[in-house]
Image: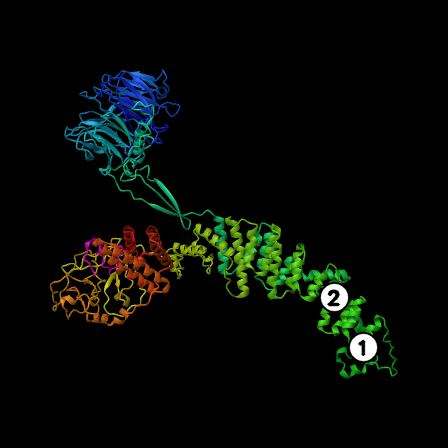
Amino acid sequence: MRLKEIQRTAHPAWSPAPHHPICLALGTSAQQLDASFNTTAALEIFQVDFADPSLGMKLKGSLPTSNRLHSLVWVNFGEGEDGLGGRLIGGSDNGTVTVYSPEAIVTSGAEAIIGQSDKHTGPVRALDFNPFQSNLLASGANDSEIYIWDLNNFSNPMTPGTKSQPPEDISVVSWNRQVQHILASANPSGKAVVWDLRKNEPIIKISDHSNRMHCSGMLWHPEVATQLVLASEDDRMPVIQMWDLRFATSPLKVLENHTRGLLSIAWSQADPELLLSSAKDNRILCWNPNTGEVIYELPTTNQWCFDIQWCPRNPALLSAASFDGWISVYSVMGGSLEAQQQSRADQISSSFDTMDPFGTGQVLPPLQVPQPTPQTTLVAPLKKPPKWVRRPVGASFAFGGKLITFESPKAPVQSPQPVPVPRQVFVSQVTTETELLQRSRELQAALQSGSLSDYCQAKIHKAPTDSEQDIWRFLLVNFEDEARVKFLRLLGFSKEDLERKISTCLGKNLQPNGHGVDANDLAEKIQLLSTQRSEESGDEVDCTKTPGSSSPSDFFSQIPPQPQDKEKKISFPIPVSADADGLISQALLVGNFEGAVDLCLNEGRYAEAILLAISGGQELLQKTQQTYLEKQRNSISMLISSVVTQNWGDIVQSCALDNWKEALAALLTYAHPKEFAHLCETLGSRLEGERTEKRCLQACLCYICSGNIEKLVECWALQRDCSSPLVLEDLVEKMMVLRKSVERLRNSEVAVQSPVLADKLTHYAGLLASQGSLATALSYLPDTSDQACIMMMRDRLFHAQGEGGAAGGQQPPPCPYNRVRVTGGDPAPAQAPAVPVQAQPPTQTPGPYQPPLPVMSVGGQPPPPVMSVGGQPPMTTVFTPQAAALSRGPPPPSYGGLPPSSPAPPPSGLPRTGLRPAYPQHPATAPGQDGWNDPPAVRGGSRKKKVVPDNYTPPAPITAPVMGGFPMEGHHHQPQGQQGHDPSRTQQFPPGAPQEPSVQLLQALPAERVEQREIPAEHMVLKQTFDSLVQRCQLAAQDPQTKRKLDDASKRLGYLYDKLREHSLSNNILGGLHEISRCVAGQNYQRGLEVHTAVVTSSNFSEIQAFMPILKVVMTIANKLGV
């Protein structure tokens, strides 16, 4: 594609690759004259600005020269401003080599010419600079003159060796692209000489023995040091020869496609597979030297192109200089010419803006250039992506922490022929969270082995903070016996310590027996009592008897006698006065305990009130306790009240948050197991409401005591960023340990119900999956969640394990999306009930599209089978005819959206057929035989011939066109005029088709064929509207073809009505049909067509293919007729 052009008869030279912006230097060409016979010469520099859509280039500077040039190069040597560094070297027709400064040319400086030498005696046609040392320049001229110039010391050139004999012109010189001291030169006679500058002598000479190789160009291979190409200018031999110095007896390869001699060649340094050539046949070709194939041809004018060059900075650009005086810049990447066409039109229009051809003093309005219908002209790029577009290396991350990398290995340069290099793709596992994986493996091992107590002990020792240790201690208690007692100890409440404190307060020494009794004192008292009893009975008891040998009668004899005169008991008065004591006595005497209790409470005699309330019953006791507690307000009254009344909700909801430990201890001591979890959660919610880190940790302890996993997760995530992998690992460890403890307590699995919990587990599973731990990640996903993201994650994890998941006996999880088979597969199950029929013809499985229906040819042979997308024969399955298929029911899918029973002409000029032919099938054939309708089997050897049975009868010749429809027994023929009208009568089937007597069962279905249900009332408007539209169009239509379409439409709309009767259309389709019906009723057919398009694009085409295409045809006809 041409991007820029300028009219000059000159040699171009691109600015070096490091320079920006890209510039193009043009030196007036020698031995060429234009139509004006102008003999002046100049060296110009143009900026190539691709932001400007026009074809022109901006002139940056110009320098008149005394001589015209045969060659021009731009060397990256020396520094300069504005991207115009380097040096321009020109070889003139009088043998002068001149060095110019591009910066001075642009700035119009006086010192534009830096150096000049006239060592050569003839025109300098060859120039090239060393790619390794940019200060070295080679030049070639007449009489086999070759000089090596040093730009640092331009006055003293050197020669590579003695001149070759006989003396010849040097048409081209070229430095080797891999070895810096190798230089090659070529002569017009076709000889090429390779020089070694270290030895100052030629080391090899190559030439074609045909003596017709007139060399016009020579280039070294950009990557292979021993290969070079020669171009022939001879019209009798317009070829490019590729030589390898290791086999220099004949060309390695010859590229032939030009019809006339070549003028110039250029080898891309960015891609060795791109070699440009221009010839006298007005063509510029781009070759792949490795294959010898022409991969691109530039669209050029009918002029010879004598110089082509690749742009060093932008490898897709090239310049071409032609003899018609135009310098053009092309791109091999293609593009659009729309901007250039618009720019030309704007230039034409602007050139007429200020014209006043009639001298009226009024400026004409801008000329409106007539523009044709805009047609975007696209220029195709290369057939194959060039090397600078292809990725030399690449990497991509895949699911499961996989890293896929590839690289393009270089072909070995030792072989002259291109050798296919095996390309490898490396799949590696990337692990970035090693600590996360290690802790995850430890947790998984503890969960599987059940040794969670040891796991918690290890976490306690490793805990960095006291709060972390407290949490793990609380979690550990859940796996031990007497958990409530141990929770109390963790809170700082121990019964032994408390009893010791009480004894200290009461002045007693607490002993290890735990009852607050001094053991020594008790032992002394028992000894003293025994001594006294032994002394009192010493006179009466024999000293020889031990205390344990006395008889029971002796015990009763030792009891001291009671005094005979009893003392009189002290009498006491019963007050019945009007004071408080008298009233209390009177109340007790009549049994009024409630009144007596009230009097005691009123007098502040609380002990007597509680004693009397005990005798008055439970209700009076509770009332008395409540009254007492209300009057006694002190620091422990609320606690005593809760202990007495067992109302722990007040403690949990009303205690100071600083006393959360005391409240939790009270719950652990007194709360009922059924209320314990709820009370702990209430206390935790109060602590969590403070929104501080300290209170949240305290709330977590409450949730651990209650066993509430969801609350623990929500509270833990409140003060921590769970997006960090290690923080999330901390949370999951606590979550899973608490979950196992709850499952141990309940003896059942705990399901994940909380969305927050499911989200954290899913995030954690994703982290594990990204580190390659797929099986562990799958175990953490919630099993009962129906969220699409979790189901999709589970499906990906299962299938990412490959065969390992299936080998473990796991069933694949349900996929949240409907799987679509891209290639052929099993057909979808039929919706209508199948009729048990023995005749089962094969049908092709519907894949991405339905192949055309099988149609018998005139010769009675089946057509070639239709190949599927993958190039394999379509799979076959057993098709059972349905009852609905005999009437006008839902048609099977078909290619092109037309039902098989449609009377419309089938595509591709196939014969018109009726319903799908249902030929009866032969019994199963042997493995070595083929059925008549089987797809051709691909075999490695020769195909076996079928064995013809002895009783084989050849088919009867065809005497009438083959009609479609279901085949019936054809033993009784009807007259020709009656056939094809009565569906209950038998029909013809193609002669020679296999048949069985069981086909008669198909005739036993007339009742089901006639029955039709009514269209639902809400959809009856569709039938009325569409039938009315067809009738109006039939009355207004004059064209026979239109009438035939409308007749076809009235029949095919029946498929829509059948689907309405069967309720088999989705709500989306029904809504669209009703909207189309309203548009038709309002004669807004354009809107109806838009709705039609929306319905078709958003629906399953197999549901609507039978009626939606014809509905569009009817609306189009109605819009055209204006009915």
Question: Which residue shows up at 71% across the image and 72% down it?
Answer: 619
Q: Which residue is mark 1?
A: 589
Question: Which residue shows up at 33% across the image and 38% down it?
Answer: 389
Verify whether residue 745 appears in magenta: no
Q: Which residue is mark 2?
A: 627
Q: Are marks 1 and 2 in contact (CB under 8 Å)?
A: no
Residue 435, given in percent of the width and then of the height, sits at 49, 49
Q: Which quarter of the picture shows residue 217?
A: top left
User: What secondary structure is the magenta-colored segment mainly?
Assistant: loop
Residue 1115, given in percent of the width and then of the height, sits at 30, 53
Residue 301, given in percent of the width and then of the height, sits at 22, 31
* Tag of residue 672: none
Query: Disc 1 or 2, which lies upstream in sequence?
Result: 1
Amino acid residing under circle 2:
Thr
Amino acid residing under circle 1:
Leu
Closest to the observer, 328 or 29: 328
The quarter in which the N terminus is drawn is: top left
* Residue segment shown in magenta: 896-913
